[in-house]
Image (cartoon, rainbow, N blue to C red):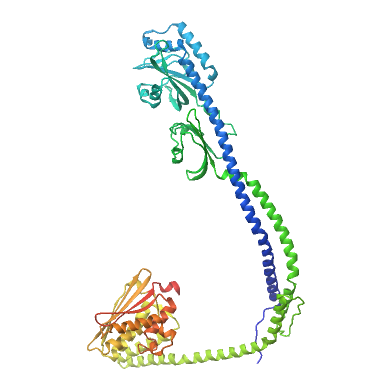
Amino acid sequence: MELNTHFIDKNSKKNTRNRFHFKLRSKFILSFFLIVLIPFGIFGFYTYLKSEAVFEKQTSSLALQRITQLSVRVDQQLRDMESLIGQITSNNSIISLYAELPKYSFKNGSSPSYEKLLFYTEALGGIIIPKQQYFRGIYYIDKSTIYNVDTIHLITTPYYEFTYGNETASPLISGLDSRILMQNWYKETQKSPDQTNIVGTNYRYYDNYTSQCVVTVSKVAKDIKTKEYSGVLFLDFDYGILSSLIEGQNNISYPNSDLYIVNKNNSIMYSQSRALIESPLDYDFVRNLGGLDSGYQNVNKDGKEMRMVYYTSPYSLWKVICFIPVDEFSKDAFSIKIFMTILTLICLVIVLTFSFVASSKLLRPINKLVEAMAEVEKGNFSTRINVKSHDEIKYIADSFNSMTSNIENLINKAYTAQLKQKEAELSALQRQINPHFLYNTLESIRGVSLFYGLHNIASMSKSLSMLFRYSISDTLSVTIRDEIKHLDNYIQIQNFRHDDKFEVCYNIPNDLYDYKILKFTLQPLVENSIKHGLEVKMGKGKIQIDISKVDNSLEIIIRDDGIGMSTERVCELNKKLAEDVALISGNSEATTEAGTGIGVINVNARIKLYFGSQYGLKYITCESGACVTIDLPAVKYEELT
């Protein structure tokens, strides 16, 4: 008999050969590709990282140099402001006029002479001319009164005022009452009467409900003759005296960077956002900086990785702090990254070209082998390959030639085996006719019994037919509900035989009935309890079945009140269960332990095979009767079916 084989068409064979050829060539080319790509990739990545580190260090050093220069320019402005207030406090005519202010009553028209006021105006104007662009106000405080003395504004309780000069040129300050005597800068100025106190940036509020950001310096004014304390003088300069040094200067800040100037108490003197003026730069890494520290370090600022570059002025103890995003440093190394990428691409093109040419030559013998295999696919087993090389391809060709000479015999053997398999399947189908015939016969008996009123026989026939129907079903696993129904049919038949001797009680939560269990798990164990524990017992016997869910497992406990087992017998059974005697040794006695074709150890072996070795049966010692536990995974039936 000829073998009826199935072959793919010619085009499919050709596509198969092309796919094979393409895959092999792709692997060849890929190998060359990786040989070049991996070293170049590692070298390029290492070079990029090193260059990025170098650029990061250079950029940080350059940033430190820039903010150091900025700090020097800020210090110069502060020194100029210190010089101005020093000239005023050392001018005898100006201080004398300030000292005489308390004796004048502007309310009653008593005031300094016109000559004194004119001389004062000329003297003060000559001093402030260098900073006239930024000058905003000069104020003198004696023990009880605050004077706006750039235009001779007098403010006294209860705020009667008399004004000399151009009032609109320098607005009258509001809120400068006795509370100013409690402010820290005022106290610090009094503590150091011979030094200028750099108060710094603050907001000044005016009577016309406006405010202005100013930079303030203060110093104690002494009587020229007696050298005694006269009052405190403070000068206000526009915020532009600082911001003009920074804003608009491209060499100071970096893209997406934040620049701050803080005093020794970490209060912000300058910020790109004026809303932050006078508020603290409240970060732990800022508070932890030393008094005269300078340098740079990486910090996490508001969830962003930043490089903090800082410099502390030895003159004012102000710190210039610049926060630069770490990502900005990698931009400087971008040119090197582009160069390495282009170089790698050029090398890859060269390698791909070479590997394509080389693969065409090296794969020519393999093409011959593929063509010969296509002939074999057509049924031409006389095909032979002639390869002149002396390498592994030659060995494969010789093996192919040897294989084709035996292939027809192998096909004949396979065909014979296929026929025998078909015969075995047909025989198996014929054997299934008997259980189905028996099931149908039992149903007929049940029908006749009901017709004649023999209800006991009908009920027993129904239970027995349901047992057969359950047995011949081809499913391996069922729901707990189906297994319980099968067990009820079995118990009903046993009670027919033993005059209702057995009672089975269930303790099963409703939500567990749809969980998965192997078919014929409970019935063999109950049958074992009846045969060895309850059948020989006097009186009725009771079997209790409890099912519960513990974590991800189901625990089934079957107890009976039969004659029980000794401790030695329990240990012996558990040892057999642990060793899987039924599967390993093929012990027929073990597999029929319960007097059935399934048996206790068989049930245990099936559970371990199906669910895993961590599950199975275990007998435990009870005060009366016997007790066996079943451990199964807690899986609902529909999840795995």
Residue 68 at what x, y percent from top left?
Answer: 55, 32
Q: In this view, does 414 lie to the left or right of 626?
A: right
Front-lying residue, 465 or 225:
225
Give the tally of numbered discs: 0
Extreme residue in the left direction: 539
Q: In this view, does 483 lie above or below 332?
A: below
Q: Is residue 393 above or below residue 88?
A: below
Q: Can residue 451 be seen in this view?
A: yes
Which quarter of the figure has residue 477?
bottom left
Residue 430 at what x, y percent from top left?
Answer: 49, 92
Which quarter of the figure has residue 7?
bottom right
Front-lying residue, 346 or 503:
346
Q: In this view, does 85 lie to the left or right of 522?
A: right
Q: In this view, does 212 lie above or below 369?
A: above
Q: Can residue 520 be seen in this view?
A: no
Which quarter of the figure has residue 641?
bottom left
Residue 147 at what x, y percent from top left?
Answer: 41, 16
Residue 127 at what x, y percent from top left?
Answer: 51, 15
Q: In this view, does 443 lie above or below 138?
A: below
User: In the rendered view of the protein, which quadrant contains the N terminus?
Assistant: bottom right
Front-lying residue, 490 or 36:
36
